[in-house]
Image: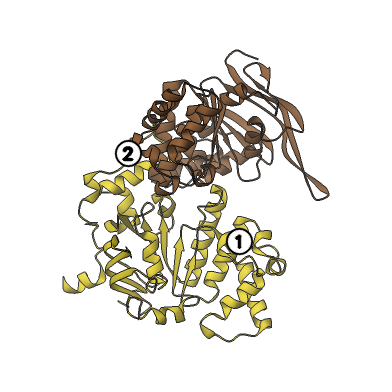
Amino acid sequence: MSEDTLLRTVRLSKTFKVGDHEVQALKDVNIDVRRGECHAVVGESGSGKSTLANIILGIYPATYGEVQFDGAPLRQDRPRAMRRRIQLVQQNPLSSLNIRRRIGSSIRLPLDVHGIGDRGGRKARVEELLEEVGLEPEMARRTPASLSGGQRQRVAIARALAADPDLIVLDEPTSALDVLVQARVLKLLDRLRRDRGLTYIFITHDLAVVRALADRISVFAEGERVETGTTDEIFSAPKAAFTRQLIGAVPVASDEEEAMREAIRTTGRAGVA
Amino acid sequence: MADPVLKVRDLHLAFRKGRHTTEVLHGVSLHVNAGEKVALVGESGSGKSVTAQLALARLQQEKGTLVDGLVEVVGHDATHSPAEIARIRGHRVTMIFQDPTSALNPVFRIGEIFTQVLRAGGQKISEADARRKAEQALAEVHIPDPARALDSYPFQLSGGMNQRVMIAMALANEPELLLADEPGTALDVTVQAQTLRLMDEMVTSKGTAVLFISHNLSVVREFADRVYVIYRGKIVEHGRTDQLFSDPRHPYTRALLSAAPKLIGGGLPDLPEHSDAFRDPLIVHEGCGEPDDEVTA
């Protein structure tokens, strides 16, 4: 393992039993996530991208293959200190946040669980975290229901940051948001990664969303990784037919973009040769 | 020129809860001509979906709803006689929603729902004729095995299939006006693109007028003839699609455009939560006035 690799999967496979037949959700997947990068995992529903996330997070085990984290195998049953290092932000903060808990208490929970700071310091820490994601410290007393979608997603991000992780798995973090709110949340995620030296695995079905944020992109289709490249490579000369199809589906706002999209869809290259 | 199929004039809407009143629409005017595809674009809370709900007369009788102004749907007054709209809903004016799987009643088979749709507004049609018409409608939206789809429950079909079923149902009675509220946004981008292409093809061939509601300007670019941009209950810019995209003038329209993920251009835009400029007065592009203005002008 090269020393700048933070997480790697080796022939990762997952089979689910559905009735009396089996569905192979992941097939021999090797990915390599470098320390400090934003690695996007892009595919349609059923491509295996969320299965990959769930195995990395230890929600269920792989059927075959291995996840390595910071040079050591990462099993499903992992010590709390290891769980702290990998955090999750999900698509819908209304279902991922406890609606009965006040915001401050939700963000404080990881501090209590992982024994971060002393009791007196935790309240101040919660306020710092709220400010770090662009929310007023007073928001700690509110409940999720009284917040907008964008504010809730900021709370979910603050809660993930509370554990002081190395890696955050972002599972469609902006898919439920309007374009304007999405743009602001992406900007926040970008800033946090730079400020804290975080590593992201950014899962999405929409290639265009990760274009401004991702360093590298892995494209998944039907449980397999079909292509990995730098963001520039993926958008200027995608190799897999499925990647071209994904780019061909992106809604665009200008004639220039439309010409580029059609060039990729038909020739596989963005520029005129 | 014939009357528009949808005419909204100085529409105000407020919700009263106890002693507290929240104003949602502050004098919205828009129109959709017969066979025309018009988009209404804004973020959540801007009032775009309630405008469609008012056109369907589904809000007027709710407790605490205060409506003022004109909403005219295929010649019927939705503000003063919502019961008239209820009679034409489902055949002369129809709707498609964001999440097709939750919009279809899970306890009925697709075929049963389809028969109800074909009988909307008290139209008489036999079981056998309804079945035949439904099969034909599903075939038109490229559903591979229409007979089998009709015997399925909505949860047995994929989101993309249900979206096609919704489109087929919405257009089966050849309505004059279709209200499409973010169709496909709950689906994968590839399926969303297919859905939009299909909807475009279908409404064009049937000559149905559409009011298309979305938060994403890019999505409406290839579909709409004209676009209204709405911000906090007020229309801020209105123009033909080519005018609006080649020359977006209102600061809010520009913010919306810069927020959409792009294939070209670097970096993430820095977008303020709110800006006084977003409240700048309405900008109307050349030749795009409301029908009544043209008369008085």
- At horizontal 41% and vertical 78% (from top left) the residue drawn is B85
Q: Position of residue A68 (x, y in %)?
A: 67, 21
Give the colour in which the image draws chain A.
brown
Residue B157 location, x and y as percent? 66, 59
What's the chain of the residue with tag 2? Answer: B
Which residue type does callout 1 highlight?
Answer: Asn
Q: Position of residue A235 (x, y in %)?
A: 51, 34
Q: Chain of mark 1?
A: B
Splitting the image into 4 quarters, where does residue A225 fall?
top right
In the rendered image, what is the letter of the chain coloured yellow? B
List the residue tagged with mark 1. Answer: B162
* Residue type beneath disc 2: Leu
Question: Between marks 2 and 1, how big is the CA–CA gap?
Answer: 36 Å
The front one of B213 and B174 is: B213
Which residue matches tag 2?
Answer: B271
Q: Residue at x 44, y 52 (%)?
A: B219
